[in-house]
């Protein structure tokens, strides 16, 4: 049987979630924060590590930025050798951006560090709790997209 939630429980959850979201949403997207790259560059690298090749327009949409700002983030990643531009075989005027071996290693270093920190925090709660929280976060993300 599921325990009833009080209004105070829901209130506390709401306040904690808003605090977390604001921490991520309002941080300086251009400040160097993780392994020498900005939050924006980190997100762009994450998309490229998972989706392999994207255009600047696709990256801009995923980052909720205009094309010029997305292009600057990609150029910064390109300047450190984390990404490269590849001509699209179907349209030679278009370039696709992809993570280089160095970029994939940087992405792994960033995500491994974050995962270690999350594991340290979750350790006291156990696997069942971690999976329930992950499920809740997925549901909240889906709700936010609607």
Image (spheres, rainbow, N blue to C red):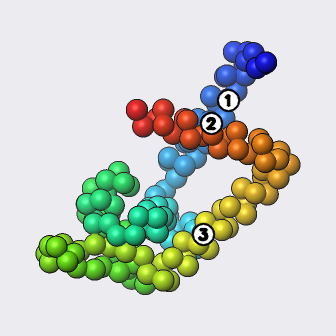
Which of 120/91 is in front? 91
In the image, taking residue 46 as reference, residue 53 lies left or right, namely left
Residue picked out by circle 3: 110
Residue in the picture at 35% in, 80% down: 84
First in sequence, mark 2 or 3: give its number.
3
Residue picked out by circle 2: 136
In percent of width and height, residue 68 lies at 26, 63
Which quarter of the rendered picture does the C terminus lie within? top left
Q: Is residue 115 above or below residue 93?
A: above
Q: Are marks 2 and 3 in contact (CB under 8 Å)?
A: no
In the image, taking residue 102 as reference, residue 108 lies left or right, namely right
Label annotation for residue 13: 1
First in sequence, mark 3 or 1: give its number.
1
In percent of width and height, residue 126 lies at 82, 47
Spatial CA span between label 3 and label 1: 28 Å
Q: Are marks 2 and 1 in contact (CB under 8 Å)?
A: no
In the image, taking residue 102 as reference, residue 65 lies left or right, namely left
Nearest-to-viewer mark from 2 and 1: 2
Residue 20 visible (yes or no): yes
Q: Is residue 91 above or below residue 58?
A: below
Image quadrant assignment for residue 110: bottom right
Nearest-to-viewer mark from 2 and 3: 2
């Amino acid at each position: 049987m599921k325990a009833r939630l009080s209004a105070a429980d829901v209130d506390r959850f709401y306040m904690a979630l808003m605090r977390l979201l604001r921490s991520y949403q309002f941080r300086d997207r251009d400040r160097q924060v993780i392994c020498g790259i900005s939050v924006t560059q980190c997100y762009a690298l994450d998309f490229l590590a998972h989706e392999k090749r994207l255009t600047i327009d696709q990256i801009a949409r995923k980052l909720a930025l205009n094309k010029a700002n997305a292009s600057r983030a990609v150029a910064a990643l390109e300047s450190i050798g984390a990404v490269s531009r590849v001509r699209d075989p179907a349209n030679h005027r278009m370039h696709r951006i992809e993570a280089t071996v160095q970029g994939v290693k940087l992405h792994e270093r960033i995500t491994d560090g974050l995962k270690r920190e999350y594991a340290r925090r979750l350790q006291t709660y156990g696997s069942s709790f971690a999976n329930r929280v992950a499920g809740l976060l997925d549901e909240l993300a889906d709700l936010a997209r609607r």
